[in-house]
Amino acid sequence: MGPGAVGRRADQPGHAAGAGRQPPCAVTCASSCRSARGGDPRWIWWPILNGLVLAIRPRRSAAKYAAIWTPEGSPLLVGSRRQAAALNEQLALRGSSWTWVLAMRYGMPSIEEALRQLRSRNVTRMLMLPLYPQYSGTTTASAVDGVNRVLGRLRDVPEIRWIKHFPDDGGYIDALRASVADHWERHGRGQCLLMSFHGLPRRNLDLATRITASCHKTARLLAQALGLAPSAYRSASSRASAAPAGSSRPPSTRCANWRGAA
C-alpha cells in the first residue's frame, strides 16, 4: 500500500526530542499504487496505460475479482479499513493522540480527502506510512509522489516525513508468522511453504535490485520465525517479464526463480 504522513495538531504542544514521548499526529496510509517512476518517459507509458491496459485489463480481471469480492466490498479496502480502525483503537487505549487516516493511491478514500481531514484537525506534522514492506520506485515512491502532488497545491505545507520500508521489522515478521500459523491450524500444513512476492518489469529490477534482496530477507526471517529448514520453504523472486515499464505481474504466474534461502 502507498503513501502516509504524520501531523501534529497546532493546538497541542510538542515534546522535546529524546524525551521518549510521541507527539500527537495523524497517519495516512495509501494503497494500490503503480507508476513508471524510474522507467520510461510519461509520453510513452501514459497512452499504453490509459489506451490499452485500462481498456482491456479490467474486463479480463472482472471474473477474478468477483471470486474474492466480499459483501462489504473490495478485500483490500475492507482489510485496510479494519486495520486502521484496530490501530486507532489501540492508540486510544494507550492514551495516545495519534490518529490513523486511510487513503488510497487510486480510488476512495483518496489522498486528497485524507489530507483534507488532517488539515481540518489542525495537523501540522505528518508521517507518511506507505504500506509496502519492500521498497520499490513503482509502489512506495509512487505513493510519496501522490501525497507530494496534493501538498504541492497548498501555500501552508505541513512538516512531513515518510517511512521508506520495513522488510525486517519484528512486528511485521511476527504478524506474517501468526497468519501462516493460523492457516496451518485451520487447513493443515503442506510439505513446503511458498512465499510469492509481487512481480516487476525487468527494467525496474535492473534500476533497483534492492526490492529483490528485501523480499528474500523477509522470506528468510519468516522461515526462521516458523522454525523452517531451508528445504521446507521457497521464496519466488521477482522474476519480471519483458513488459513495458509500468506493468507488472505476479512471479508465481511465470517460471519462477526458486531460492531456499535469502
Image: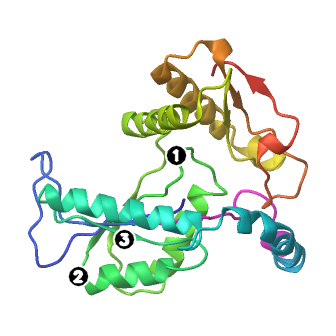
- Residue 65, given in percent of the width and then of the height, sits at 72, 66
Asked whether the viewer can see residue 155, the reply is yes
Q: Is residue 80 or residue 102 the one in the foreground?
A: 80
Asked whether the viewer can see residue 3, the reply is no
Image: magenta residue range = 29-45
Question: Where on the picture, by quarter, is residue 251?
Answer: top right
Q: Is residue 110 or residue 160 the one in the foreground?
A: 110
Q: Name the element at disc 3.
A: strand
Q: Is residue 5 left or right of residue 231?
A: left
* CA neighbours of label 3 inside 10 A, class few (<14), some (14 to 19), many (20+): many
Q: Which mark is residue 101?
A: 3
Quarter the C terminus occupies: top right
Picture residue at 54% right of the left edge, 31% below the top: 184
Q: Main secondary structure of the magenta part?
A: loop
Pair 2/1: label in front? 1
Pair 3/2: label in front? 3
Quarter the N terminus occupies: bottom right
Labels 2 and 1 touching (C-beta < 8 A) = no
* CA neighbours of label 1 inside 10 A, class few (<14), some (14 to 19), many (20+): many
- Residue 36, given in percent of the width and then of the height, sits at 74, 63
Picture residue at 70% right of the left edge, 47% below the top: 198
Q: CA distance from mark 3 to mark 1?
A: 18 Å
Question: Which residue is under mark 2?
Answer: 122
Q: Is residue 256 above or below residue 90?
A: above
Question: Which residue is under mark 1?
Answer: 133
Amino acid at circle 1: Pro
